[in-house]
Amino acid sequence: MGNVIHMQDVTWRREGEHILSNINWQVSKGEHWAILGLNGSGKTTLLNMINGYIWPTTGQVSVLNQVFGKTDIRELRKSIGWVSSSLQEKIKGSNYTEDIVVSGSFASIGLYDNPTTGDYKKANRIMEQLGCDYLQGRTYQTCSQGEKQKILIARGLMASPELLILDEPTNGLDFISREGLLAAVNQLSLEEEAPTIIFVTHHIEEILPIFSNTLLLRQGTIFDKGKSVNVLTDRNLSRFFNTSVNVEWQKNRAWMTTAH
Ligand SMILES: Nc1ncnc2c1ncn2[C@@H]1O[C@H](COP(=O)(O)OP(=O)(O)OP(=O)(O)O)[C@@H](O)[C@H]1O
């Protein structure tokens, strides 16, 4: 099994503070991970590190078997799809959805290169797969929040990445759109050439059964990690959130409520 992410004794310090410390984490091919953590726990910092935008102060990082410091990060980034709210903010509302998706081939936000008919065919196939092909011919600004997220995920898949990072993709979605998006992510994971998916969320019930593993991040350290069923327990999450919670499993998803 190949290593998709390998972090060994990683720390990241800024202005005398440890933003990340003692991070030992391995994601193997065939696993999909959820990352859960309160605001400011270091999730974005961790993702920035995986994408090579920041470097560990100490420790070693390798992504897709490429050791940082010995590899061309820009090349590596072509194998990583990253969907985040900061990407969402960069998209121009007047762009056509299919052009946004195609731009994922060129790792550009706008469409500056000359896409081929093949690129558009691929975009169409991915959009079909995510159930958003009906949006072709529409501008981004006319799409709902859920539709926009699907477009950005489709864009992230255009370069056939080996690793797909979905950073709080359900933010701002109503219940129906959220479940629609989760169903699309689930479907995507079943595809033959599916990338490894890292799914960052604040909501436990969004951790679909495909997310075999979960990482709990607290104050820049790993609070717990491992099989989701073992990590998402009453006892563990009560300690993690510092408040008493109950977890109930329904349809292989964990639902959390406060215990009082
Ligand atoms: N460049 C930096 N310099 C100083 N502090 C930083 C820097 N980047 C992040 N931090 C701090 O590190 C901590 C973790 O931030 P990070 O954005 O990784 O958290 P997060 O888990 O993604 O939070 P959220 O859920 O709110 O997005 C925060 O306290 C933040 O202020």
Image (tube, rainbow, N blue to C red):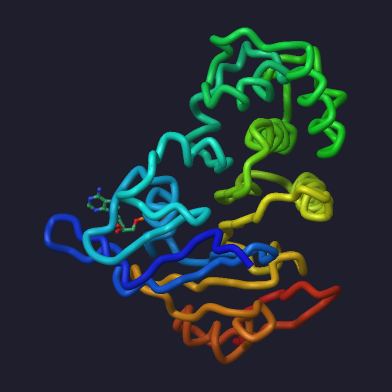
Residue 194: image location, x then y, percent: 74, 50
Of 69 and 219, the residue lying toward us: 69
At x 53%, y 26%, the residue is 107
Quadrant where the N terminus is found in the figure:
bottom right
Of 121 and 217, the residue lying toward us: 121
Vertical side of 233 occupied by 25: above or below? above
Vertical side of 87 occupied by 57: above or below? below
Residue 27: image location, x then y, percent: 56, 66
Vertical side of 236 occupied by 60: above or below? above
At x 46%, y 65%, the residue is 6
Most distant residue in the bottom direction: 235
Q: How many marks?
A: 0
Q: Quadrant of residue 43?
A: bottom left
Of 130 and 68, the residue lying toward us: 68
Image region (quadrant) for ligand 1: bottom left
Question: In the drawing, does residue 217 fall left or right of residue 144?
Answer: left
At x 52%, y 39%, the residue is 85
Quadrant where the C terminus is found in the figure:
bottom right
At x 57%, y 22%, the residue is 106
Question: In the drawing, does residue 21 fall left or right of residue 167?
Answer: left
Q: Quadrant of residue 244?
A: bottom right
Question: In the drawing, does residue 208 fall left or right of residue 42?
Answer: right
Of 228 and 204, the residue lying toward us: 228
Most distant residue in the left direction: 16
Vertical side of 23 occupied by 164: above or below? above
Residue 254: image location, x then y, percent: 72, 75
